Image (tube, rainbow, N blue to C red):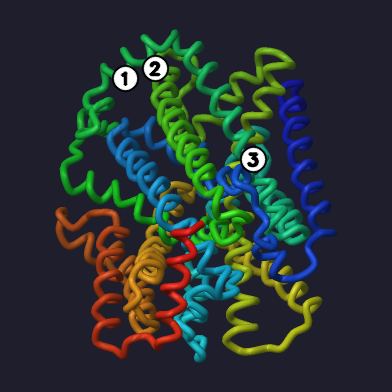
Amino acid sequence: MTTAQICIMISIVVYLSLVVIVGLIYSKKTKNVGDFYLGGRKLGPLVTAMSAEASDMSSWLLMGLPGLALAAGIAEVSWTVIGLAIGTYLNWLIVAKLLRNYSAKIGAITVPDYFSLRYKDKSKILMAIAAVMIIIFFVPYTASGFAACGKLFGTLFGIDYHIAMIVSAIVIVGYTSLGGFNAASTTDFIQSIIMTIALVIVLVFGISKAGGMTAVIDNASQLSGYLNIFEGYDAETNSAGSFGFLPVVSTLAWGLGYFGMPHILLRFMAIEDPKKVKISRRVASVWVVISMAVAVLIGVVGMAMVKVGALPAFDDSETIIIQIANLLSHIGIVPALSAGVILAGILASTMSTADSQLLAASSAASENILGGLFRLNLSEVSKMVVARVTLIIISVIGVVIAWDSNSSVFGIVSFAWAGFGAVFGPVVLLSLFWKRSNKFGAVAGMITGGVMVFVWKNVIAGLNPVLNIYELLPAFICALVVNVVVSLVTPAPDKDIIDEFNEVKKISKSK
């Protein structure tokens, strides 16, 4: 190994050691499944905010987003960023506090738990459907994180993609299975800091190597449509593309996904003090806007670096930050260690999402399907064993899905995001704000959302160019409509459900 590679490896090993130590520390504090999956509802405002957003952003922030900006200009990524920024703020504003109070009132420790207890579904069908949907969409989402790790080490050290992916998966599973929710949340907080440092270092170094910000803008301006948010850039034809009304609306729809993300909703449920949600909202919103804007700018800077010869041309645009870090590592020992921090940031973005997804999928399989649907009466020790074994099994499936080294991080995340947004977004909103909603509407809405994501993407979108929009938007609308209609044509909720709904609304207004 070269000196640069050794320095990079040192930074990464230090980082990985840190997250494993955190897992070991919290393993001693994790006494039951409530601690394992929800941390005893003891998250402070800063950790809540940063862990929620770090688990949300994933490798998409440091790989997918700048890669798309580099390859196709700022049109699609800009509208995506705007949609996500709006979605982040609204989710914290209207969902966080109310969901925390409602879940605490009914004793829910997982998202499927919340739906089942909110609608008093004794059959557990609602819980089972929610759990199955979580597994369906989270396993490939987790796989995207493993794929990002494989690409990272394969590009840097020439390590076999599959070996790198497996080792990364083992580390993630290790600290998550040891410390559960608290370990995941604490490491996510640490990882958000590392991600921020990585973005700043890459941006500053990239601009300097591209010849300054003026040179970056001049270079981008020479590419037709590259800096136009209504056109975009078509690399194949070296000409401007077209990004009209429908693409803009469908891309903005990314923001709808926030209302249905189980790993984010779990952070809301785990908030210690509902009165401090406002602090979390401000921190989360500011961090998301700045980090996404910087990620997009890095993509533009990367294009300039290639044009001026600071970086050689490369095939996979999603590795742009890895390429810049690799360039930085050859300047000297300190820059090489800094490059290691950057690459640890990519690991952090990947791991912060993968650990949260593994917990959500694990809880869905063990707590909601085995314990809820099949009513297995297990001791606390047995539940913990089942939870950890389930987490490992799901990880193995994720590794199998990510086995193809050509898989796209952005593409996998996009589809999974649509799935969660359409399946859970409408039912979460209606459960919190419409007392007439019932379990029949919730079941119908979930199934409709999940089915429509698959049908729209694989069938309807190809029928006509006008219909080729992001599947989240039509699936979300269909799920919402079906939920409302079915709720209205089926029996109204019982009085005790209505009374509980009104009591939670009253508590949330007073706190």
Instruction: Residue type at mark 3: give it.
Output: Gln
Residue 213 placement (x, y as % from top left):
40, 12
Whichever of labels 1 and 2 marks the residue nearer the N terminus, that label is 1
Closer to the camera: disc 1 or disc 2?
1
Q: Quadrant of residue 403?
A: bottom right
The answer to whether the residues at label 1 and label 2 have Cβ atoms under 8 Å apart is no
Q: Residues within 10 Å of mark 2 (few under 14, many from 20)?
A: some
Q: Secondary structure at mark 3?
A: helix
- Tell me what residue is drawn at x 76 percent, y 70 percent: 32
| Inter-mark Cα distance, 1 to 3 | 31 Å
Question: Which amino acid, mark 2?
Answer: Lys
Q: Is residue 410 above or below residue 170?
A: above
Which residue is denoted by mark 3 in the rendering? 191
Q: Amino acid at mark 1?
A: Ala
Above/below status of 88 relative to 38? above
Q: Secondary structure at mark 1?
A: helix
Q: Nearer the viewer, residue 27 or 319?
A: 27
